[in-house]
Image (cartoon, helix red, strand yellow):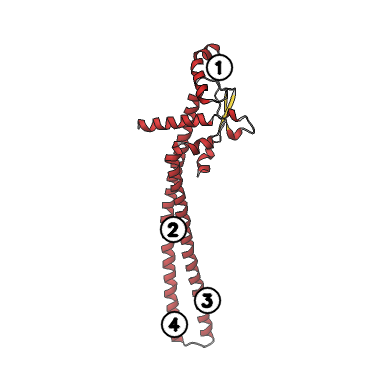
Amino acid sequence: MKKTLLFALAVVMCACGADNKSKADATKSDATEVRTVECVASGDVVYVDLDYIMASSELYAKEGSALETKVKAFEEKSITTQEGWAKKEQGLAAEYNKLQADAAKLEQDYAKGLITTLNAQQKQEELQKKGNSIQSRMNALQSTVQTEGQKLQEEERALGEEQMVLVNKFQDLTRRAIDEVNADHRYKMILNAVSVVDSDPTLNISEIVLKKVDELYAADNSAE
């Protein structure tokens, strides 16, 4: 589930700041205070681990994990339902094949004179009733598959929308969090960790962004 929710997050996020001295002076005191608290190296380029932030966020703890449980339950129900349909279809197919074999044998026995015409007619009527029953049950199964299949598709679409909303909400929180963290433009570029091959761990500002994401998430919920 985490992978499902995070696949859309593999993006590079950049924040460019001006080198203007007056702007730097205007934010100097704030920047110094943040550095003291965050204990993360300041530099032109830093990075964030979006997968880690999502998995560790309050958003995932309160909404993502619940959605993950719903998706898992749906997948199990879907598999069980489809296996049930397949089993019934196989059973009906087996009955039909046996019916065909019985009809062929009846015809052979009658041709050989091993059964009277009256008995052959009676058996033929019995086979016809069985055939009608099989066809009726097959029609009912097809109707069930169509009706329940549509319900499963609707449920799947609804879960897909919930997943997309969760992803969009996380992207919005992350974007806002990064904007606030880099409000003083100390970082010229902020990369997604998936784009980083090797780096100094002190350039990882994921914990800072995670803290801000959780703050923004709490603030959004309190405002509702």
Label annotation for residue 18: 1
Q: What x and y, as percent, mark residue 26?
A: 49, 13
Which residue position holds label 2?
145
- Residue at image position (52%, 80%) is 105
Measured in 3D between alpha carbons, the distance from the residue under mark 3 to the one under mark 2, in whole angstroms, is: 28 Å
- Tell me the amino acid under the disc marked 4: Gln
Mark 2, secondary structure of its residue: helix
Give neighbour class at mark 4: few <14, some 14-19, many 20+ (Cα, 10 Å). some
Give neighbour class at mark 1: few <14, some 14-19, many 20+ (Cα, 10 Å). few
- Tell me the amino acid under the disc marked 2: Val
Q: Across the whole image, how many numbered discs are drawn on residues?
A: 4
Q: Which is nearer the N-term, disc 2 or disc 1?
A: 1
Front position among marks 4 and 3? 3
- Tell me the amino acid under the disc marked 3: Ala
Measured in 3D between alpha carbons, the distance from the residue under mark 1 to the one under mark 3, in whole angstroms, is: 85 Å
- Residue at image position (58%, 27%) is 46
Measured in 3D between alpha carbons, the distance from the residue under mark 2 to the one under mark 1, in whole angstroms, is: 62 Å
